[in-house]
Amino acid sequence: MRRRVLLLLVVAGSAALTAGCGRIGLGKPVATNAVLLPKSYRFDPAAIVVKSGTSVTWTNHDNFTHTVKVEDGTVHKISPGQSVTIAFPKTGTYHYLCTLHPHDMRGKVIVQ
């Protein structure tokens, strides 16, 4: 009986850890050029769609500094209450992340 209970605890613990790992999809892309960083270690919305030539603005409403690093490698630091704007002149899908919180904060810009 003891072995069975231990096995159930191990299985339940593994399931809980696995559920907490990784990020559930970025969600359906939203047509906007504004991304917020609310007090929750995330980008909102995480996936956006813009037209070629559009600039996207990220605004930090959190109490902590975050960054936006797009695939080109440039890291843009955003202090609380500040914004950063990045132009997207070419079509494509551009993934980005916060280099300070890469496991929680990821997103993408789809340029059409």
Image (spheres, rainbow, N blue to C red):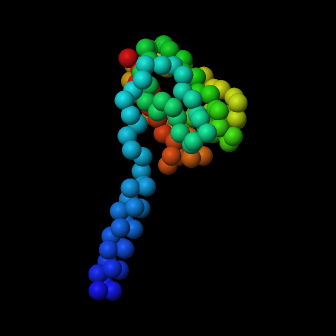
Count of numbered tags: 0
> Considering the image in quadrants, where does the N terminus appear?
bottom left
Which residue reaches farthest bottom?
2
Residue 72 visible: no
- The residue depicted at 29 percent of the width and 81 percent of the height is 4
Q: Is 41 in front, or is 103?
A: 41
Q: Is 68 in front, or is 20?
A: 20
- The residue depicted at 39 percent of the width and 44 percent of the height is 24
Q: Quadrant of residue 75?
A: top right
Q: Is residue 99 above or below residue 29?
A: below
- The residue depicted at 43 percent of the width and 55 percent of the height is 20
Residue 7: give x, y in percent of width and height: 31, 77
Q: Quadrant of residue 62?
A: top right
> Considering the image in quadrants, where does the C terminus appear?
top left
- The residue depicted at 42 percent of the width and 46 percent of the height is 23
Residue 84 visible: yes
Residue 56: give x, y in percent of width and height: 54, 21
Residue 33: give x, y in percent of width and height: 51, 19
Left or right of 39? Residue 70 is left
Residue 35: give x, y in percent of width and height: 54, 27
Q: Is 5 in front, or is 85?
A: 5
Left or right of 76? Residue 10 is left
